[in-house]
Image: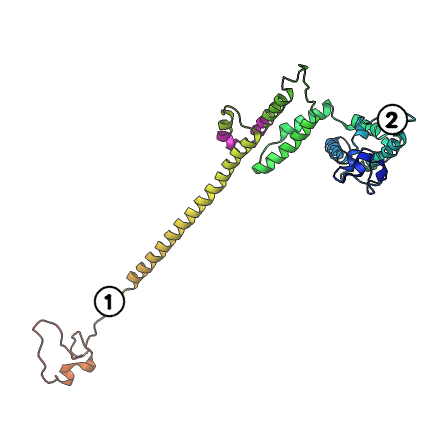
Amino acid sequence: MSSSSIPSSASGNTHVDPYGNPYYLREYDHCSLLLVEDRLTGHTDFNSWKRRMEIALISRNKLGFVDGTLPRPPDGHPDAGTWSRVNEVVSFWVMNSVSEKLAPIILYKDSAQAMWEDLHSCFGPNVQHLYWLHQKLHNIKQGSNDLQTYDLSLRAVWEEYKYCTTTPVCSCGKCECNVEKRWMEFMEREYLMKFLMGLNDSYSAARTRILMSDPLPGSTEAFRIIAQEEQLRLIKPKVASEAVSFQAGVSSAAHCSGDIVDEAITNYRPKQRPICTHCGLLGHTINRCYMLHGYPPGYRSPPQGSGHVSTPR
């Protein structure tokens, strides 16, 4: 589709999005374009696939071709031919986004909307699927997972559950009942309860503190409170371990010091005084015995009973 499909009011204004015209196609908006990488395979991935497709189609202003908001113009209408050509391109996009086993099921549908509705009727949300989601939510527990892993696992299923749940609409006729706001608050509270129920019992004190809060915190605030508790638990063993290591080091050092002192005491031997083999007195050897070799000049005899004979140094 060339730029001639763009309304004349947009042709001279470079700031206007050309996709404002739902019939506009760029050069790379060809039939073989793959809008989403993960092709639809069945019930289990339909909701995530549908949401990705909606985002891709909205970004190109082509969602109206599948949800019925841009119906086929009557025959003879100026846009009838253009609608048909763009519809065929969008139909190819839908077929390219499903698995090979599903493509034949929608191949012969006459419009992208018919393909979309057929896939929705086959794999879209139903009572059985909602039951399956409820069961998954009930079975998700923290277990051996850390807090963030547990929260991400639970939130992924919860977001799909919300997507499949019919949102109530205003019934007052005046839009004064705030039904959408009250519904969002209700769903937020439901998620908070499921999040708290799946936590390990070790968080029972923090869980009780949250449940006793008035008003109840949102799920984001509750996660922050539990995360702080988890961080404290990670810090305490580390501090305790470092304290034990420090004490062990001090004890080891003291023990080593004690061993050195004990060894010094054990190995201490007082200096032995020599004994003369000639006279039998202490303090000298036979080589320096005065009785044997003579007394030196000026020698003074030691007091009686001293038990030794002095020798010069």
Disc 1 to disc 2: CB gap under 8 Å: no
Whether residue 149 is visible, yes or no, is: yes
Q: Residue at x 73, y 24 (%)?
A: 128
Rate crowding at label 2 as few (under 14), some (14 to 19) or many (20 or more) other CA atoms within 10 Å: some
The question of residue 194 being in magenta is answered with: yes
Q: Main secondary structure of the magenta part?
A: helix
Q: Position of residue 119 (x, y in %)?
A: 80, 29
Secondary structure, mark 2, is: loop
Reading the chain from its start, which is encountered first: label 1 or label 2?
Answer: 2
Whether residue 144 is visible, yes or no, is: no
Q: Residue at x 24, y 67 (%)?
A: 270
Horizontal side of residue 212 vs 67, given as left or right: left
Which residue type carries mark 2? Answer: Pro
**The C terminus is located in which quarter?**
bottom left
Query: Which residue position holds label 1?
Result: 270
Query: Is residue 30 or residue 296 the one in the foreground?
Result: 30
Q: Residue at x 50, y 41 (%)?
A: 234
User: Residue 240, relative to residue 289: is it above or below?
Assistant: above
Horizontal side of residue 45 vs 102, given as left or right: left
User: Residue 242, relative to residue 176: is it above or below?
Assistant: below
Which colour assignment does the render follow? rainbow
Query: Which residue position holds label 2?
Result: 73
In the image, which residues are magenta?
192-206
Query: Is residue 65 or residue 291 the one in the foreground?
Result: 65
Which residue type carries mark 1? Answer: Pro
Residue 35 falls in image quadrant: top right
Residue 56 falls in image quadrant: top right
